[in-house]
Amino acid sequence: MSIEKTAPRRRRRLPEEARREALTSARALLLSGGPDAVTLSAVAGEIGVTHANLIHHFGSAAGLQSALMASMVADLTQALDVAVARLRTDEGAPLELVNAVFDAFSTGGAGRLAAWIALSGDLSHLEPVRAAVQNLVEAISDKMGVQDDQARQGMGAAVLFIALSAFGEALIGPPLRDMLDQPDDAARRVVASLLPRFLITKPAAG
Amino acid sequence: MSIEKTAPRRRRRLPEEARREALTSARALLLSGGPDAVTLSAVAGEIGVTHANLIHHFGSAAGLQSALMASMVADLTQALDVAVARLRTDEGAPLELVNAVFDAFSTGGAGRLAAWIALSGDLSHLEPVRAAVQNLVEAISDKMGVQDDQARQGMGAAVLFIALSAFGEALIGPPLRDMLDQPDDAARRVVASLLPRFLITKPAAG
DNA sequence: AATGTCATTTACATCGATGTCAATTGAAAA
DNA sequence: TTTTCAATTGACATCGATGTAAATGACATT
């Protein structure tokens, strides 16, 4: 008779791995089906475990949602940090930064995430983004040689403007562009064309 | 003995009135508590009826949600139409239009509505907006004396840009402005300052 | 006053999502 | 091998949201 071990009827994962798989699946569900699609049963079914197992790892359904938000926020801040790094070292043009932000919000799912958080009401999950966007303002200011506080405020306004546009594009861009007969890249082109207005440092008034 | 009529134990409304009350309550719930707060029980409790009554008037919970979306979209289009009318008759400046759009998205609740629709996935409810935004482009183009199609495309881009910014401001504006130390009116001021870039009609190249 | 219509309610049924707990079992440690 | 740990599961309970059907009653019509 064969001495082969019978295939295990259960797959046992390390807790980190289990959480990782669950969060990956949950993110896909959020992006495809919206917040209501992120249920314990749905996530569990996708990765081949039971919903009780998810409760074991995340404590509760709210815990899973919270972990998902934290995970996606972490990815967003990382993307922003990468953009900052490129801006500081490379010859990375500001346009590259605009593209990075737009990609983070649309492809990366930060847009749907932010909308979910905003509609839910618990904005605390966005807190880790604060440092990232402030770094972004710093980086642009340094790159542009901005010194005075007033101009730095203007850089903050520019980042606000880019983020709001990227967020809007990610959520309602496609249908709105269709209504206005605008091409796919209309939003980023507009933002890119308006950006120099901010980045040109005004000479101090004499 | 008194011949006074005893107070009726039930209040009987006309169907239109019942629907109107329900939609008003549902909108308040959406704006305060998000999409998940718009349940049959919650709406029914607010206007003093049973949830079965709402099903009688709207057919189903989905029917109520659909009617709510249609109602809010109608208000948005009406707000846009009013802005168009002011722009055509009055000396209404384009800045007034920017303010009207921003107010519609934030105060009027169109922002949360659009986010809800976008996350839900059924974009068909936004269809009535198409004519309104196209009218908006027409009005601005006429006011600015735009003739050629290329410039008209630019007007479309401007409307897209305003709408995306207003939408973003309505949803994630407050926390994002806080992170960037920006004043309450930062977003509209940015949009207003960038608008002339679009509205100045370029002279035809010779 | 009698009648019919239909808005409204009451009671009940269903379904999905969440949560609990004890039992099971894969895998490492002893 | 034996023991121990804990990831995993299965069964069950609960709760809220949705939906259904019959009964009730407010109000207009006759």
Image: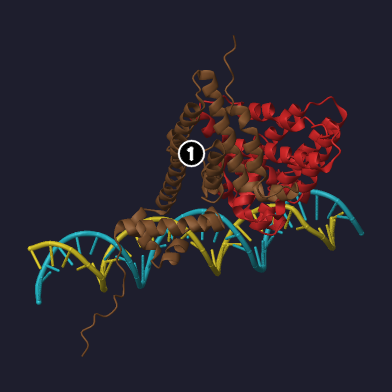
Chain colours: A red, B brown, C cyan, D yellow
Image coordinates for residue A145, horizontal then vertical, percent: 86, 33
Position of residue A98 measured from the top left corner of the image (x, y, whole percent):
72, 31
Is residue B67 depicted above or below A60 in this figure? above
Q: Nearer the viewer, residue A16 or A163?
A: A163
**Residue B100, percent across and down?**
52, 43
Q: Amino acid at mark 1?
A: Leu
Where residue B102 sits in the image (x, y, percent)? 56, 44
Is B182 or D11 nearer to us in this picture? B182
Quadrant of the image containing the N terminus of chain A: top right
- In the picture, the quarter occupied by the C terminus of chain A is top right
Q: Is residue A23 left or right of residue B171?
A: right
Is there any visible trace of residue A13 in the rendered image? no
Specify the subunit that label 1 lies on. Answer: B
What residue is at 59 percent from the left and 12 percent from the top?
B205
Which of the 4 quarters of the picture holds residue B14? bottom left
| Above-or-below relation of A96 to A158 | above
Q: Give the tally of numbered discs.
A: 1
**Residue B186 visible to an observer of this rendering:** yes
Q: Residue at x 67, y 37 (%)?
A: A105
> Residue placed farthest to the top in the image?
B206
Residue situated in front as seen by the camera: B68 or B5: B5
The residue depicted at 36 percent of the width and 56 percent of the height is B19
Q: Which residue in the protein does label 1 denote? A: B123
Is B104 left, or right, of A57 in this rendering? Answer: left
- Residue placed most toward the observer, C6 or A146: A146
Q: Is residue B103 above or below residue B20?
A: above
> Horizontal placement of A121 versus A5: left or right?
left
Q: Residues within 10 Å of mark 1 (few under 14, many from 20)?
A: some
Query: Secondary structure under badge 1?
Result: helix
